[in-house]
Image (spheres, coloured by chain):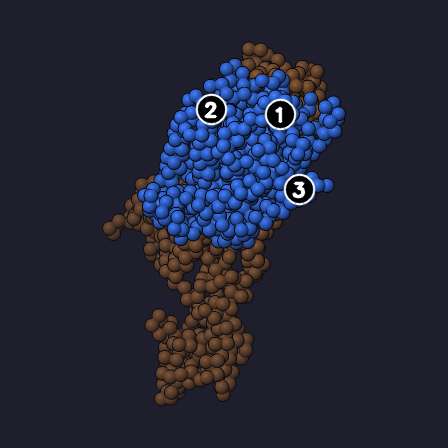
Chain colours: A blue, B brown
Amino acid sequence: MTDLIGVAVLVGLLALLQWPLGTLLARAATSTRHLRVERAVYRVVGVAPDAQQSTRSYAGAVVAFSTLGVVLLTAILLMNRALPFSEGTAGMGFAGALSTAISFVTNTNWQWYSGEVALGYTAQAAGLTVQNFLSAAVGIAVAFVLVRALAAHRSATLGNFWVDITRITVRVLLPIAAVSAVLLIAGGVIQTLADPTTVTGVTGAAQTLPGGPVATQEAIKQLGTNGGGFFNANAAHPFENPTAWTNLLSMVLMLAIPFSLPRALGLILGNRRQGYAVLGAMTTLWVASAGLLIWAEHAAGGLAPTAAGAALEGKETRFGLTASALYAASTTGTSTGSVNAMHDSLTAPGGLIASASMGLGEIAPGGVGSGLYGMLVIAILAVFLAGLMVGRTPEIYGKRIRAAAMTRVALYTVATPVLVLAGFAATMAIPSLHSAVTQDGAHGVSSALYAYLSAGNNNGSAFGSFDSSGTPQLLLMGAVMLLGRFLPMLLVISLAGVLAREPRVPAGAGTMRTDGPLFTVLLVGVAVVVALLTYAPALALGPIAESLA
Amino acid sequence: MTTSFLAQLRDALPLAVRKMSPKALIDAPVMLVVWAGAALTTVACLVTPSVFAVSITLWLWGTVFLAAMSEAIAEGRGRAQAAALRALREDLSARLLGEGDERIVPASQLRPGDVVRVSAGQVIPADGDVIDGAATVDESAVTGESAPVIRESGGDRSSVTGGTRVLSDQIDVRVTAASGESFVDRMIALVEGAERTRTPNEIALGILLSALTLVFLVVVALLPAMSEGAGGGAIPLVTLVALLVCLIPTTIGALLPAIGIAGMNRLLARNVLATSGRAVEAAGDVDVLLLDKTGTITLGDRQARRLIPAGDEREEDLARAARLASLADHTPEGRSIVTLVDGLTGDAAVAPADAIVVPFSATTRMSGVDIPGPAGMSVRKGAASAVRAWAGGDLPRDVDDAVRRVSREGATALVVARRLTDRPVEVMGVIALEDIVKEGLPARFAEVRAMGISTVMATGDNLLTAQAIGRQAGIDDVLAEATPEDKIARIRHEQSAGRLVAMTGDGTNDAPALAQADVGVAMNSGTAAAKEAASMVDLDSDPSKLIDIVDVGKRLLVTRGALTTFSIANDVAKYFAILPALFAATIPGLASLNIMGLATPESAVLSAVIFNALVIVALVPLALRGARFRPASADVLLRRNLLTYGLGGLIAPFVGIALIDLVVRHIPGIGA
């Protein structure tokens, strides 16, 4: 019963939050006014904030900004030991640093290392945490571009990248992260620059407890759907996520922006119902995934769960089964990838649901920004099929979908599955990659598939038994994360360019409606069928085989 | 199955075989992949023959063949028509008019600008405009309409089509199209499908299908690596190819060309000739229909229905004057006045022999008679403003009121006045000429509105009259006192708001608007300029056919969407058939996914491939006929079609594959 109250409180808080947050996001995307802080930033960086960028220029800015991010972060990670507050941590080699830098710049936060062992406070706070803000801002900016293009009428420009990321950081991410960090500290999350503490445990043995500026990183890690933990155990660690309350706050934070962007979409399009239809599809998929995962974890049979009373392996008793399963569904549905339970230890059907949730393409509700643009691409696909069936050239929000737009949508749809399947197949077939799989049988297969679903969709969570620390895996994963982030992103920007140039046709009785429950059903159907068709054979070999064994 | 259908199959066979070559398939990537797959399994058969491999290979080639056959049948339907048309042009000769002389030359040597003379009984050698004379022409060879039509110089009925026959009189025709570019030539090219270029929508759909094919190619290509590393074991090549062919959207890939050709054919069957498939498709997208009032919404001619005498005039006097003014007026309107008056008074007054007929002129905008002599008089009828000018002052207030009332009712008011010798002009009253809205139109416009298309009526009438007729006919908006420039402006206005406009026209002055419209339909009776500018020509010259054209366009798009959805939805069931079969030996747990109870892995894969091929055959009629389209709002259509083709596409293969398996399992080497 308390479990259900927890779920209800989460849903209620999200429903309340999406209202002001959606409005805030919509204003950030379309406002013509600049805050004083923002003007200062533009002056320092040398940006003309009212200049508009073309498709090529915007895409170039995204690539340049992210490339710079990878270079700087790689350098910081390599210099870890030379930085203040390094606290004797080990640091990384080049392949490891590059892979980690890519991982954080792509909003994946795949962690092949243990945070508390590898990196000191400065590398974590000034390197990783900074990218947690910036990669989230880039994702939201690209979503803004697509939404503005859908609302535009014969426009040749897409907005200004530098203004977008500045506003998103200054108006949305920083204030919310600051407040959340305070709330997390109040809830018991640590925030310190002090050296690790040595204590004597109950067994009498001495133990070293690493500390650090955890709460500040934790807030943006969830809010920006990044997911990279300060500690190896991530949000299962009591210093990151001590209580049921911080656990609830963590889930609210990771789901807040993805669930608010549909309202921003509706506001910018001038029809809030359009946003609700998209929100409905995201919610349906998230609820289905959460429901199935909770059911799977509760229904587990077998010797150990029966003896323990529940499938508790790898889960924290302070959260319990339901909160763990709900967190797992939320973290895989949002591309966050932080975990409060070990996904390796989920039941086989639970692992299947978590994998499938990422396979949907991170749209339930997806990462910050990427969830919305991913869902909008699905929407265009859905509208194309269904729109023909009402006897008109398909159109979405008044934009006719022709060959140019369709090419980009088709490539977007192809890109991620190809990367995921190629990475997975390579891991299965090539011994130097296969050594990452440390478990026998179908579960080992599941761990590899999960790893590449996670990397290709920029989620970042993992089955712990998959050891990606070997150089070949580090590089392959780095490549999949990089392409899995920027191929779709560039296709979306290009798609936005195409759509912005189209006139916006007023809707009539012959127009297929995209603001009702029928469209929501269609979105869910298309998303599920597309994911099923691409991943069914791979899932059959791993998690499905495991579940049916 | 009739013999004619069998004959159609026989005729299509050679073409279908030609269409099976990989070169012919280059534009159809889906079928090209099937072809390559079939070639691969053929090699596999030769290396390690088995009943299973041979069966799969045969059915894969069968799939390629069925796809080619569906396209060939669709094209075959046009071929018969083309042959008949071609016979029209054979061995025509022309009487070419030179400087005062006349030479006989073969029609093939005529060039645009040449003038030819055609007399009764002769066949018109080329497309052109009548520049002198008038004749009745039998155009049945082109239009199928047996009633002869009148073609005359000047005006909007001047265009003649090569291959049609002059029945009476003689006309001089200025050739407008060189041999090989004539109307009939274009028609032949179209019905044969030679000029078929892919439409924007087809291209967009093609991209989606290619992308899906690519994803499945990647999935299947990576499957051996995944499977061997994951303990799924090796997968035979034949099975892999079978899986690939089942997954890629072969149904829509196979039927896509046939759907397009069938759409053109359906239009032809309604006697509309489209210059491109693009125009047919655009017809489905039309948001606004711009329709001429006269001839489209109302019967061509207005009829006199009522007389309204002025103040103290007697109706008989008004009737008599109206009759006098109309005796020499041979327009349908004039004749209808005489008919009305004769019915009212029964007195058939005849104009005196010395009466001078005053014909309608653009400057006076009145017609009538002048009867000279002391007892003589002048009688005029015309628009209120014209008569007011003639009378040199205001009209009596009650006449003014009557005029306004008549206009509001959608009728046209003609004011009748007379001037007895040495007397001032006396306004006698008003004749109400009414437009008769064509029967059944309001119901059709209601259908059009349900599809989300708005209708605009263009007319030369004033706003009041136009609005009244608009209301009667159920038109959404009117363009009153419209000039050709107004029409273009209106089209541009709609287009700038992103709406697609369709219009009909026949006159030369309609040509710019026809060209500006997204779908311009010229009447075959119209001028060559109009036909040249339009994207379609209606051979029956029936402007209200625009609605049928929209229907054909929509049906075309619906069919494409329906079959694509069906094709993709089918894949779910195919996975359920093939995945357990793939890993039956290595991952026995997957057997619980075999919910269709398929007998063996071989029978499962073969059944899926057979279903995949047969579903093409089953859907050929749908592709040729077009999916049902009943005018309704998009929401209703979508719900219905999603249920039929989406849900139906999910369920049908479960049933179909299970049934095929019941047969296939009895084949030795497949079943056990």
| Camera-side residue of A43 and B227 | A43
Q: In the rendered image, which residue does mark 2 sit on? A: A88
Give how far across and how far down residue A458 sits, in percent. Answer: 51, 32
Q: Identify the subunit bearing mark 2.
A: A
The residue shown at (45%, 27%) is A86
User: Mark 3 is on which residue type?
Assistant: Gly
User: Mark 2 is on which residue type?
Assistant: Gly
Task: Find residue B613 and report its image quarter.
Answer: top right
The residue shown at (51%, 80%) is B308
In this picture, is B608 found above or below B279? above
Q: Seen in the image, is B580 located left or right of residue B518?
A: right
Q: In the rendered image, which residue does mark 1 sit on? A: A201
Q: Quadrant of the C terminus of chain A?
A: top right
Numbered disc total: 3
Give how far across and how far down residue A261 sits, in percent. Answer: 52, 45
| Camera-side residue of A384 and A220 | A220
Q: In the rendered image, which residue does mark 3 sit on? A: A6
